[in-house]
Amino acid sequence: DSAYRGIGRLIEKYPDLTAVFAMSDVMAIGAIRALRDKGYRVPEDISVIGFDGTPLAEYYNPKLATVKQQYQILATRSVEILFGQIELKKDVIHEIVPFELVSGESIRVMK
């Protein structure tokens, strides 16, 4: 709902907008719905990419391009780090978890 409502404000502020990078796949789907309701075509007028890699992205129309996260690694390392800090008083850790760009039909190449 927030992405759906936010697209109107975004287009108002940036009328030459060519792409949206949503912070989740669900928000990307809401953005696409709003863009379509406003008469825009995805990806012909505006490209949209999500962030999560949820299975739903593969079945949405257009197939959603997304940044796929490694949920199992994120969950495991989060718990390990948290317990390490609580029980063992370890220092804060910053890690980069591998990710994958999954191309879909919701983005187009700009020429």
Image (tube, helix red, strand yellow):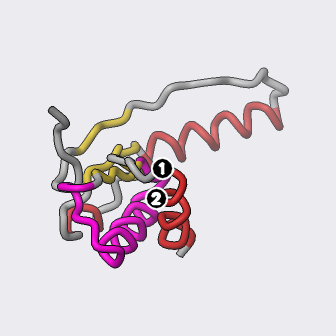
Q: Residue at x 40, y 43 (%)?
A: 70
Q: Residue at x 46, y 63 (%)?
A: 27
Q: Which mark is residue 11?
A: 2
Membership of 34 in magenta stretch = yes
Q: Amino acid at mark 2?
A: Ile
Of 32 and 100, the residue lying toward us: 32
Please state the horizontal and vertical placement of residue 86, each as a whole percent of the image.
82, 37
Q: Are marks 1 and 2 in contact (CB under 8 Å)?
A: yes
Magenta stretch: give its range.
21-45
Instruction: Give the secondary structure at mark 2.
Output: helix
The spot of residue 37 in percent (x, y) is: 34, 78
Q: Is residue 67 left or right of residue 83?
A: left
Q: What x and y, as percent, mark residue 61?
A: 19, 70
Crowding near the residue tagged with mark 1, few <14, some 14–19, many ≥20 C-alpha atoms within 10 Å: few
Say which residue label 1 marks.
14
Residue 66 falls left or right of residue 73: left
Residue 59 percent coordinates (x, y): 20, 69
Near-viewer residue (25 or 91): 25
Q: CA distance from mark 1 to mark 2?
A: 5 Å
